[in-house]
Image (cartoon, grey):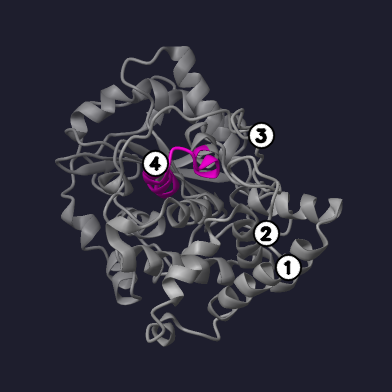
Amino acid sequence: MEKTTDCTARSPEDVLGYIPHAIGFQPRDSLVCLTATGKELGAILRVDLPRAGASRARLRDHALAVLAYLSHDAAADGTFLALYQEAPVAQLQSRHAAFLSILESMLSGAGRPVRECWLIGADGWNGSGCRLGECLLGLGRGGLVTENPCRHPLELISNSALAAEMVFRGSAVQAHPDDASDSPGRVPDPRRSASSGEDPGSPGGDDGSSAGPSAEELTGALAEWEPLLDGSQSWAGLLPDTGWPERLGRTLEVPALRDAVYVSAADGHETALRGSLKDGPSWRERFGAVIIAETGEGPDWARMDRFAEVLGRLRRETGDGTTAAVLTALGWVEWCRGRGTHASAVLRRAARKDPELHLARLLLELVLMGRLSGWSTRRDSSWRRSPQTG
């Protein structure tokens, strides 16, 4: 779940034009929810639609999960919904009426009623607040009204003033994450890996070995990352030294070094350095809390964004040779941000590249279970996507 950016939406087209920029891609088979407090938009959440033919009990469970996610924005007093599916709008109205009716009832009961619901299909879009008198779509106890549905062209969304403003700011809608992903095999229990005994954030290797790097290696790995994480060194400045990409990538392949780099990205160089060298119970607890995104105050998002940028450059530099460790780190950042679709796509690729990399498989299972990172569920610690973020 992400924060919305600072912008002004003056029409339904503006909100719908903003959504792909906010989540980074054009939604498919998705329900996008935006919380609101008064006239201010809050968090944005994308979830998959219920499966076709799901029972009413399943629809209720799906709606309860959505409500649970949205409830983390405790100040919200309203909700906007946008449902996306590649089908004619007229079909969407009847296909999802039961689910939307259940969700609308739950949201109203929770004190955050639906202010607007839009359906975006293959041939156009409409919504409960369309300005044209003949647009009769609305939410009510009987579900969606389907008589004489209005249909607006999709170009109104892509050409909206806010969509143009986002492009002007440098934002670009990326390809859907699933377009570049493969399906992994079976993944293990995320709470513990039976084959290695590794817990996320625990000392020791992915192969179950307790041998770790030396203090010199830990210090050196963090020192190589620090200029890139604090912003004092750009990637362009590293290119003449062709050994940099390989050295950075290798630090992510040794679990103890990897954990230290993750903590440095989220919690600062000093925390990572002291925790790596002292390795007491309190430091292990801190490392674990960072890696499962459960520190109450949230991470340093500027450092995390730089970490993601470097990982993206490493991925582009190596192409198909990108290591599973680099992909896992990128998946971890995306999960921390609350971008489950991005995280699952990258983690699937990591799990296929190296089925023995337990952290990738553990994180993937968390995503597939629908577990959001703790940071992404709180307004004061959640990530806000900048126009330059891919």
Q: Nearer the viewer, residue 207 or 70?
A: 207
Q: Is residue 197 left or right of residue 134?
A: right
Q: Is residue 282 left or right of residue 170?
A: right
Residue at the spot of label 2: 298
Badge 2: how crowded within 10 Å, few (<14), some, or many (20+)? many
Judge depth for marks 4 and 1 and give the one in front: 1
| Mark 4–mark 2 CB contact (< 8 Å) | no
Q: Amino acid at mark 2?
A: Gly
Is 71 part of what is drawn in magenta?
A: no
Quadrant location of the C terminus?
bottom left
Q: Earlier in the sequence, mark 1 or mark 3?
A: 3
Disc on res. 322: none
Residue at the spot of label 3: 197
Residue at the spot of label 1: 215
Q: Earlier in the sequence, mark 4 or mark 3?
A: 3
Judge depth for marks 4 and 2 and give the one in front: 4
